[in-house]
Amino acid sequence: MEKTLMVLDKINTPEDLRGLSAEEMNLLSAEIRDLILKKVNTTGGHLGPNLGMVEATIALHRVFNSPVDKFVFDVSHQCYPHKILTGRKEGFTNPAKYHTYTGYTAPEESAHDLFKVGHTSTSVSLACGLAKARDLIGGKENVVAIIGDGSLTGGEALEGLNNAAVLGSNIIIVVNDNDMSIAENHGGLYSNLKLLRDTKGQAENNFFKTLGFDYYYIDNGHDFNELISVFDRVKDADHPVLVHMHTIKGKGLHEAEVDKEHYHWIVPGELDKKPVAVNAIRKESYESITADYILDRASKDSSIIAISPATPGVSGFTPEFRKKLGKNYVDVGIAEEHAVAFASGLAKGGAKPMLAVMSSFIQRTYDQLSQDLALNNAPATILIFWGGITGMDATHLSKYDIPLICNIPNVVYLAPVNKEEYISMMDWANSQSAHSVVIRVPFTQVISTGEKDTTDYSKINKYQVVESGSEVAILGLGNFFHLGVKVKDALKANLGISATLINPHFISGVDEELMESLKANHKLVITLEDGALEGGFGEKIASYFGNSDMKVLNFGARKEFTDRVPLEELYQRYHLTPELIIDDIKNCL
Amino acid sequence: MEKTLMVLDKINTPEDLRGLSAEEMNLLSAEIRDLILKKVNTTGGHLGPNLGMVEATIALHRVFNSPVDKFVFDVSHQCYPHKILTGRKEGFTNPAKYHTYTGYTAPEESAHDLFKVGHTSTSVSLACGLAKARDLIGGKENVVAIIGDGSLTGGEALEGLNNAAVLGSNIIIVVNDNDMSIAENHGGLYSNLKLLRDTKGQAENNFFKTLGFDYYYIDNGHDFNELISVFDRVKDADHPVLVHMHTIKGKGLHEAEVDKEHYHWIVPGELDKKPVAVNAIRKESYESITADYILDRASKDSSIIAISPATPGVSGFTPEFRKKLGKNYVDVGIAEEHAVAFASGLAKGGAKPMLAVMSSFIQRTYDQLSQDLALNNAPATILIFWGGITGMDATHLSKYDIPLICNIPNVVYLAPVNKEEYISMMDWANSQSAHSVVIRVPFTQVISTGEKDTTDYSKINKYQVVESGSEVAILGLGNFFHLGVKVKDALKANLGISATLINPHFISGVDEELMESLKANHKLVITLEDGALEGGFGEKIASYFGNSDMKVLNFGARKEFTDRVPLEELYQRYHLTPELIIDDIKNCL
């Protein structure tokens, strides 16, 4: 049974906001906050950013006329209030529909959403395009980008601001300044934002004004009078405007206001639990292995330095870890391009940088990997987290890091299959100065052999034959090595074939000598990779054998954007179960 | 016989600069300018940027102690004076050695060069890494990044500045402000740089100060007193410093000072010619075809808009073209990420954007192509110029656009082989709203059939069979279609084989129906692509046929950074001549 909501029940479109009294808007804010807390506590999701944007979103939708006026939410972590106000409240009021709508803006859901967005720092440039299109076509609507202070430091956002300022017509950039990125902010810009907050926008030295923006300041982004008054003033401006709005991340939930990082994104049930000390229930994970490794190494070598581009939690870089490392830890803020070039400079300067980046976000650094890092053979170590086929939303698919990285010359891209290999690869990467090394951190439960891995990784592109057999050879890469073991067993059980099992270790090259030797007593090579097939590892093996009688089957993900498709369904679609693989092998032999 | 150089003859290392009188430094500047003019007029190269940096480079090397102190030259277009002063003057005094040194910084040439650099906007981040490494290791040297005003607007530079400002120790950023990018500057930042120049650095509102830098202004970057005095003051600073230095691009050559864009980079012999009106000797090229097409379309449709990220000359966007297009042309400055997102916003807003980018620089936009453009199926048109295997320096290789772009879902990447196909593909791209389209502009002499191309490109991944044959099928992609024709003829002449010749048109997908049909009477498929093989087009064909008896040979470039290797040598190395291809086919059949 759904609860009666005094105000929200009356709000079906943004227009319905116009007649609300001040009291009703405050009541509506409370109702929306309550819904967000319940929903996110059930499904998991972005909490802090949404709680902070409740009043501002109501005010924006009251003053502007969406979807004629166009809102672009940066990274769209903060779009839940917007969704609730634009016809999608059932996704929050009705638990049965909690999964109906995505956690990001999605044009297929509503005309009020202009873009599918999940990466940061893109809103200003996208909005510039909408505004310029309007000018060419002869429209009159407002174009409004809403961007958090954390996202401002991404290169694309800064490029966008520089261009937005000279657009010469209406564009309104609302900077939601809650003094936080996912973790704390980093960079010189934030001292200026603080100065502006401290002076209520009056300081002479103003980052946004240096770019040429007409600047407005909102001191209390939870006060409807102030919000509406400023939005009313800037509406229909005939020139670029920047509204700097101070809000509180996590507003309305005490714990989230206090520990902004922890409550940025929460897991289901989080709000029902007593706060648990980070280490009390700490289980070993590849994140904890990474952090422990770096702490241990740094205790012996002061040139070790860990780097995160604003996502320390993903790589096990807890607040405690960061404190322990001190000057040997740098969070560069949302600035992946800088992070890679910085790591390259560090390595060339004689330090031992270890940069941790999510698969999905390394996409922002192709040119830095190529030009700043690989072309200079800078011996930095980059750790890619969460690389693999997932059931995540379309904006955070993590299957493209292999095609992205493995085709860049000079980069050694490694795929460990267990804890010992992972540690051994980090050891090797840190002990050599000839190669830029990227390691795809296993995205599985921790698997440990208990025995030290003594592989010599300086033998570039040397694969490991784990089991010698005949007829079929299985190349099980990284996360999918374990699938390879299952396929081997199933081949024996089903077809009586004693297959060769190979752990390639190297994603970025072909072990030509080993491949050549397979020709003697194998008819088929199968490749298994936990990523997109096109441009990936397996295609190189297929190309290698193109001039021979060897058959090759490549298993991995198709080139497509999938949106919250359950992993099991994807495995069926891509034939990534032992049964389906055996079927394909049967058809081929 | 080499000319005697009164001052330069005494300068073998930077140390030799310390004893020079003011008069000698001015004489040295004149000598260096003269050498640069002669050398660049003979070999071609970057002229304007180097002429502008002569005095500043002398002053930097006199004050700082390179290579202990470390200089990082952004994009390194301006490093000729640096090379002359650091042991490589013979590359400028001796015409026989004009080609001994690259046009960019190159660590293999000299300890005074820290990085191989040719893409813009990377110096600040690289310098941050060097400075942080110094701090970890316990060094005391100065780290100096030298960056032009044009490069400042690239996202990586802005990310770098934001981080450099909070480094907490010595880093000196010298902004060489000559009020120009390759073409004129674009963006709000430049109004602030002008304000700072106009007020001799005194304006309260100061972009660099908002980030937290200790700021110094040099009004005349060609005056040794001023240069040395400021560099002396900032040397050994214990905190981040920004020196804003005003120079004149092309300084000392009247024509270059007046027409800064034209003299940014010149071809051999340029300085001996009388100035020629742009259109007087205009020959048809794919650049002129592009410009003419856009002008024609824009005259009929006001929503057509041409975009360049600071490289208008590369795509035929001459000053005249830009003037004619007016508000339908936007140069976003050095800001490729913004350019792609801007194009996506324009397309979603109903305009018809046509963005022109060099192959080498599209590398800066993988994530924008994926997230801002393709995920949103924004029907923008992106034109890739200079895509192909070249004998260029390692920083501008143009063979990676195929692996970069063709593995992104939803993007339709097209490869026209002649003028008519190119025009027809642009027509199709602009007339549809279902796909993000990228076109690899032919990088060959113009080939014209004289007959309108009527191919229906909405049939995605439908290849064209140009000639039906048997035994061998040749897939000649884009620029290499014409190589395919030669191979076909040679196959007939040498082996009596009537091969099938296919023009794939689509780089980004496999025509599975056609490939399947080849199995009936073909034994071998060969693919020819003018780009890097790994992650590219041919590997997809090899993977497709992996489960069959069809043999596949992929021809293209190896994954490697090559540096000014003559194209003929690369064609030999990669087996890209009809003769070598025929040999490989013989070995395979």
Image (cartoon, coloured by chain):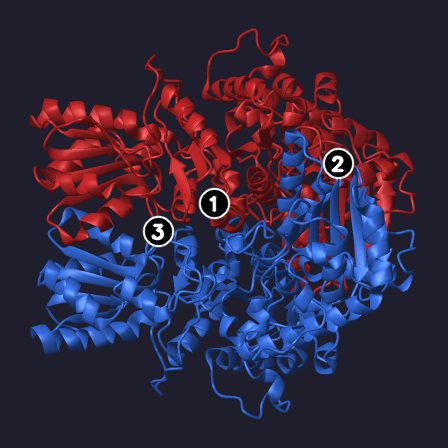
Chain colours: A red, B blue
Which amino acid does the dot numbered 2 rest on? Ser
- In what element is the residue under mark 3? loop
Q: Rounded to the nearest whole Å, what is the CA distance between mark 1 and mark 3?
A: 21 Å
Foreground pick, A403 / A324: A324
Q: Rounded to the nearest whole Å, what is the CA distance between mark 2 and mark 3?
A: 42 Å
Q: Which residue is mark 1?
A: A377
Q: Is residue A142 visible?
A: no
| x 60%, y 59%: residue | B87
Residue A175 x/y as whole percent: 75, 43
- The quarter in which the N terminus of chain A is drawn is top right
Chain of the residue that carries numbered disc 3 in the rendered image: B
Residue B485 x/y as whole percent: 23, 76
Left or right? Give the position of A2 relative to A152: left
Which amino acid does the dot numbered 1 rest on? Asn
Chain of the residue that carries numbered disc 1 in the rendered image: A
Give the crowd class for mark 1: few <14, some 14-19, many >=20 residues within 10 Å: many
Q: Quadrant of residue A146?
A: top right
Earlier in the chain: of badge 2 and badge 3, it is: 2
| x 24%, y 28%: residue | A484
Q: B287 above or below A61?
A: below
Contact (CB < 8 A) between labels 1 and 3?
no
Residue B515 x/y as whole percent: 20, 59
- The quarter in which the C terminus of chain A is drawn is top left
Q: Which residue is mark 3?
A: B535
Which amino acid does the dot numbered 3 rest on? Gly
- In what element is the residue under mark 1? loop
